[in-house]
Amino acid sequence: MHPVSRRAIIATPLSLALAAFPAVAQVPESWEREFPLTDFSRTTIDLSEIISGGPPRDGIPAIDDPEMMPAAEKEGLEAREPVLVYDPDDAPARAYPLRYLTWHEIVNDTAGDVSVAVTYCPLCNTGMVFDRHHEGQVLSFGVSGRLRHSDMIMYDRESETWWQQATAEAVVGRFAGDFLVQLPAWLDSWQGFMDEFPDGLVMDEPAWPRSYGANPYAGYDTNPRPFLYQGENPPHGIHPVARVVRVGERAWPLERLREAGELREAGLVLTWREGQASAMDTRRIAEGREVGSVRVRDEEGQEMVHDIPFAFAFHAFHPDGEWMVD
């Protein structure tokens, strides 16, 4: 197995060996036409939960081998714009601006010795980085055009297995029941990245005709109800599209952390500082309202795997999760 970062956390599979899969509902012919290699007889979920997000397979084009450039030379990014940061052990830190990820959702990259999938689902605000090594091969990922609980379903091009981005789980196909390794990464402002990693790298603008810097989901994170979501609202009166800080099966409301500035709970140190705009607020991302930047470390100062989903997404994918409220 390819070695992973010493800071990585490996998710535990549902079982060491899946003895049986749920009965498979009728598979739409359109799925079989678009994904001829997918083994639809192997699934860990009810296929009726999967819906079309609108675009077909690869209608939202993933980026392969992105052009990276010295952050100090990058022009056009504003100080408060959000970037997804990955800091490998053996290479310069890398920033992936959400002005690009919002339009492409997946970037297949190689950072140092690790091949990574940098992912962002705008509808759930889940920014997550995964190791692409799985069972002795390097997978490359694309956007299936399908959603479950409003979250992107990715697929790997090698086996056409479908993967749930929010949980890192293979839910349909050859690898059903397996999990990708999620790596420590975090959302920061462009200025915050530059201050911490002046010698870092940043993803350059892709050569696609997209309105980079614009938010195609303007007003989304103040809507009363998430787009294409039919599940339950989160408990404790938490707004469905309020942000939470997820670490494993626990979720801290972002507003609680914002008010405190720092929380020390469950063996973790969570911190918040101002300076980052919401990517899902105004039409122009750089003008989004303040949401701030979060870091999660253990008591020894090591970066911890986490993400900042909307509350509805945490509740949908972690229905028995622990809500870290006052």
Image (tube, rainbow, N blue to C red):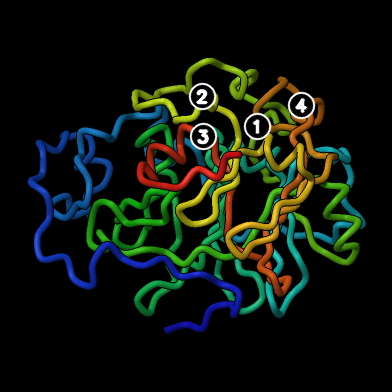
Q: Residue at 76% x, 37% y: name it.
A: 259
Rendered-image quadrant of the C terminus: top right
Which residue corresponds to mark 1? Answer: 210
**Within 10 Å of the Cα at label 1, are there few (<14), some (14-19), or many (20+) other Cα atoms?**
few
Camera-nearest label, 4 or 3: 3
Q: CA distance from mark 1 to mark 2?
A: 37 Å
Q: Earlier in the sequence, mark 4 or mark 1?
A: 1
Measured as percent of width and height from the top left, residue 111 is found at 65, 70
Which amino acid type is shown beneath numbered disc 4? Gly
Q: In the image, which disc is placed on residue 157?
A: none
Identify the residue position indicated by label 2 in the image. Answer: 237
Q: SS of the residue at dot 1?
A: loop
Q: Is residue 135 left or right of residue 277?
A: left
Say what amino acid the circle numbered 3 marks: Ala
Q: Which residue is mark 4?
A: 288
Amino acid on which the number 1 mark rests in the picture: Arg
Q: Is residue 1 above or below residue 73?
A: below
Distance (Cα) linking label 3 and label 2: 10 Å
Mark 2: secondary structure: loop
Label 3, on which residue? 311
| Nearer to the camera, 62 or 126 | 126
User: In the rendered image of this protein, does residue 178 appear above or below residue 325?
Assistant: below
- Mark 4, secondary structure of its residue: loop
Q: Is residue 172 visible?
A: yes
Residue type for callout 2: Gly
Q: CA distance from mark 2 to mark 4?
A: 24 Å
Q: Pointer 4: residues within 10 angstroms few (<14), some, or many (20+)?
A: many
